[in-house]
Image (cartoon, grey):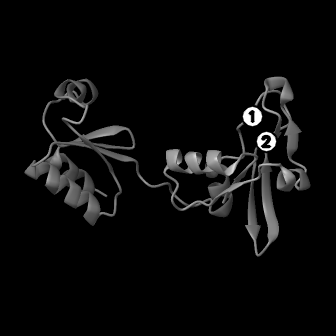
Amino acid sequence: MCISVNDTFVMNEWAKDQQAQNITFLPDGNGEFTEGMGMLVDKTDLGFGKRSWRYSMLVKDGTIEKMFIEPNEPGDPFKVSDAQTMLNYINPQATPPKMVSLFTKVGCPFCARAKEMLKQHQLDYEEIVLGEGITTRTLKAVANGATVPQVFIDGKLIGGSDALAAYLGAL
């Protein structure tokens, strides 16, 4: 759940922009909840009016178990209220999912093979299709190659479908 001192229209657009289908965005337009939490701050000097100080909290059965409140310092600190801090608190041994990007072309059988291998290994991926505003020139600049697929995992170039098969076989 995400609560913010904003109206419902802003919250709905924010949810769409973040593609956050599994998060409930709740507007606290008048700041009543936020004030009750002791987190309402005056940002009129910046032209923002009343806003919420940044924090995250873990609530279980209506009881606050843990809060991560940003330090009281100038500006808009974002050091401890982030999702990763909360996830580390909940499960410090958890490993984040691999970040996979895949350059493809429509109708490419090697691309289909790479996508199938990623699915079999339950690796979610973002597909970047050449021809939809992405050119071979971009592929050459990013992957130093012009053939597809080109697979990147956690920022590292793995290569084509054969290289992906070797990488997945080594896991």
Q: Amino acid at mark 1?
A: Pro
Percent of width and height locating residue 166: 20, 52
The structure residue drawn at horizontal position 51% and vertical position 57%, both measured from the top left corner, is 95
Q: Amino acid at mark 2?
A: Glu
One can see residue 70 in this view? yes
- Element at badge 2? loop
Q: Residue furthest bottom?
A: 61
Which residue is nearer to you in this view: 36 or 126? 36
Quarter of the image where one finds residue 64: bottom right
Q: Which residue is mark 2?
A: 70
Q: Find the distance from the CA under tag 1 to the CA under tag 2.
A: 6 Å
- Element at badge 1? loop
Percent of width and height locating residue 165: 19, 54
Percent of width and height locating residue 121: 30, 63
User: CB atoms at circles 1 and 2 under 8 Å apart?
Assistant: yes
Which residue is nearer to you in this view: 71 or 62? 62
Q: Is residue 12 left or right of residue 170?
A: right
Please say if 147 is above or below 28.
Answer: above
Q: Which residue is mark 1?
A: 77
Q: Is residue 68 left or right of residue 110?
A: right
Comes first in the chain, label 1 or label 2: 2
In the rendered image, the quadrant that contains the N terminus is bottom right
The structure residue drawn at horizontal position 20% and vertical position 24%, both measured from the top left corner, is 137
Quarter of the image where one finds residue 80: top right
Q: Residues within 10 Å of mark 1 (few under 14, many from 20)?
A: some
